[in-house]
Amino acid sequence: MSELITAELVDLDLSAETKDAAARALAERMVAAGRVTDLAGFLADVAAREAQMPTGLDGGIGIPHCRSTHVTEPTLAFGRSAAGIDFGAPDGPADLIFLIAAPAGGDADHLSILSTLARQLMDETFTGALRSATESERTAALIRGDEAPAEPAPEQTEPEPAAQAAEAGGEAPAPDEAPAPQPPAETSAAPAGRPTPAPFRIVAVTSCPTGIAHTYMAAESLEQAGKAAGVEVAVETQGSAGFQRLDPQLVADADGVIFAHDVEVRDKERFAGKPTVDVGVKAGIGRAAELIAEVRRKAAHGEVSAPARAAAPMDKDAEPGDGFATRLRKWLMTGVSYMVPFVAAGGLLIALAFAIGGYTINKAPSVADHFLWTESTSWAALLFQIGTVAFGFLVPVLAGFIAYGMADRPGLVPGFVGGAIALTVNAGFLGGLIAGLLAGAVVTAIQRVRIPGPLRGIMPVVVIPLLSSVVVGFLMFLVVGKPIAALQKGLTDWLSGLTGANAVILGALLGLMMCFDLGGPLNKVAYAFAVGGLANPNAGSLKVMAAVMAAGMVPPLAMALATIVRGRLFTKAERENGKAAWVLGASFITEGAIPFAAADPLRVIPSAMAGGAVTGALSMAFGCTLRAPHGGIFVVPLIGQPLLYLLAVAAGTGVSTALVILLKGLRKRPQPRPADSPAPDGAGVTVAA
């Protein structure tokens, strides 16, 4: 394992004027050291982290950092700026800049070293030594901990009492007449025979989006402020190296709780019912003493937090500023992500059954009553009936896990019940969406009701499932179910009647959605729309499924082809990614184009969208159909008009390839550079994945 920082990764005369330029200068040292494989991709990841929250800290410190697939091993680069660089700290520019790079799967040993560094940044002796260092090697040793910083010279102290008395012309007190030491502030001498009161005890949790620097700096600041205030502070750092839960007894005995976090606290319900201060992680660094004073004040006034519930699974990584629209998208994506395996299993089994036994296999009798081992139609019927059962879970699973994303496990029962009712009243896929949202909202509302302590134990097992199922069932059967069923029928009829220009426009729109964010929310919306139509297939819904899968194959195939046609326009890493993109694109895994889009989004994404729109439109125009929800070229035998379908994919791939080559060829380079060097374009811009 290499050293975290070496002299080559230190720049004591950093001349950059902006934070982006500083990050680039330090990142270039990492590239030269072989620690970063793709400069542009890594800088895009750094910029994405910086966009979440500024990384400047009080005291003239900037700590840009990220986890990235372009980092080979945990690495730290250090730069010292004479003029100072603005990293968004309240007290002004930073002169000490630490660029922290952690691999996507960083090992715990190196991450613990990074956490130690973060704590050292709270020590003025350490930062003072860095400001006065004159040699890169010694600076690297200081940061690694191989060399201890020199202690500052002691300051002039007040004269001793004897000296004061002598100067005043009086007598100094005799040694045995020295004044008795005063008790600490806010502490009175305990009466004889009464035990000394226990100190105030606080438990705290710190966390930040990356879990590398701010997490541990806030912990160090809270611990030091606790010592200064005579308060016992125990901190649980929920960082990149994992976290070790505080002892349950320690939590139970605590007099107060501090949450200094920018991502949701894991297992937050452990701290319910105690005086609580809940702030961002930067407040834990800069206002630790104030937070401790505030939690003591709340304890003195008897203010306690409401009984906590576990954070919904899709809210665990939510940012504090996330609005309703962002959270709604995450809830819907929860349902879709759990639904897709049922869609894939059931849909592929049904498609395979049709391939073996023909389209009349759906009329075969139950294999439980009639099955002949030697007949292919019996095996086709078996596959069809298994697939039908699996596919039948599509809507209930969608609804159940949307509710799960909103309200955690208590949302599962009413969500599944609401989804099943959606099928009963023929509300279909749209009914499942509404049922999941209703179930999550009802459970969340019930959880907010204050319940006496003795009854809390039966709430998640009996009360919440009972009440929420009744409410959701009532709403789905008698209020919203029939209107949604009518809307679902209208949508189905519309898809069945799609012909000519309308079909082509829909295909182009779906192609654009599939290729805009390459596996992100819009991609998933288009895919969910397509697979929802497979629950009750008709000519229109089968065309939609074909267009969606064809368009989703285009981006990775186009990038793979472009790396062959004009390889010099791509970095070595991109050309290697291109080899894998052939397989990913052929398998309908749109995410295969993400490495290219992350490095150069302004050229790759428009090119991919143009090709996806062409393919979607052609697929609809050709009347191609598809009964399988996934599979790429491996389900071509199950596609209606297979040759025209492949032609549509090839046409879109050609359009995307030509556009991306044209756009990359037009960019201006300030100076010639080797073909294998990372391209500077696209730094600081990311794409949803």
Image (spheres, rainbow, N blue to C red):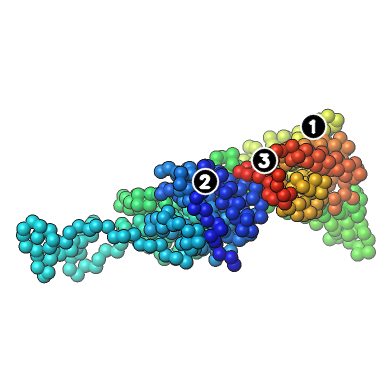
- Lateral position of residue 89 relative to residue 627, left or right: left
| Res. 670 mark | 3
| Residue at image location 91% in from the left, 64% down from the top | 373
**Up/down of 146 relative to 97, above or below:** below
Q: Earlier in the sequence, mark 3 or mark 2?
A: 2
Relative to 104, does residue 689 appear above or below in the rendering? above
Residue count near mark 3 (Cα–Cα under 10 Å), binned few <14, some 14–19, many ≥20 = few
Percent of width and height locating residue 143: 48, 60
At a point 56% along the width and 64% down the height, the residue shown is: 3
In the rendered view of the protein, which quadrant contains the N terminus?
bottom right
Residue occupied by mark 1: 505
Q: Nearer the viewer, mark 1 or mark 3?
A: 3
Q: Amino acid at mark 2?
A: Ser
Q: Amino acid at mark 3?
A: Pro
Res 352 quadrant in image = bottom right
CA–CA distance in space, label 3 to label 2: 20 Å
Name the amino acid, label 1: Ile
Q: Which residue is mark 2?
A: 15
Q: Is residue 35 left or right of residue 161?
A: right
Residues at marks 1 and 3 touching, judged by CB atoms closer than 8 Å? no
Where 654 falls versus 253 (above or below)?
Answer: above
- Residue 251, image quadrant: bottom left
Earlier in the chain: of badge 2 and badge 1, it is: 2
Neighbour tally class for label 2: few under 14, some 14-19, many 20 plus, Cα within 10 Å: some
Disc 2 or disc 1, which is closer to the eye?
Answer: 2
Residue 361 is situated, as x and y percent measured from the top left of the image, at: 89, 51
| Secondary element at image label 1 | helix
Measured in 3D between alpha carbons, the distance from the residue under mark 1 to the one under mark 3, in whole angstroms, is: 42 Å
Of the image marks 1 and 3, the number of the one nearer the N terminus: 1
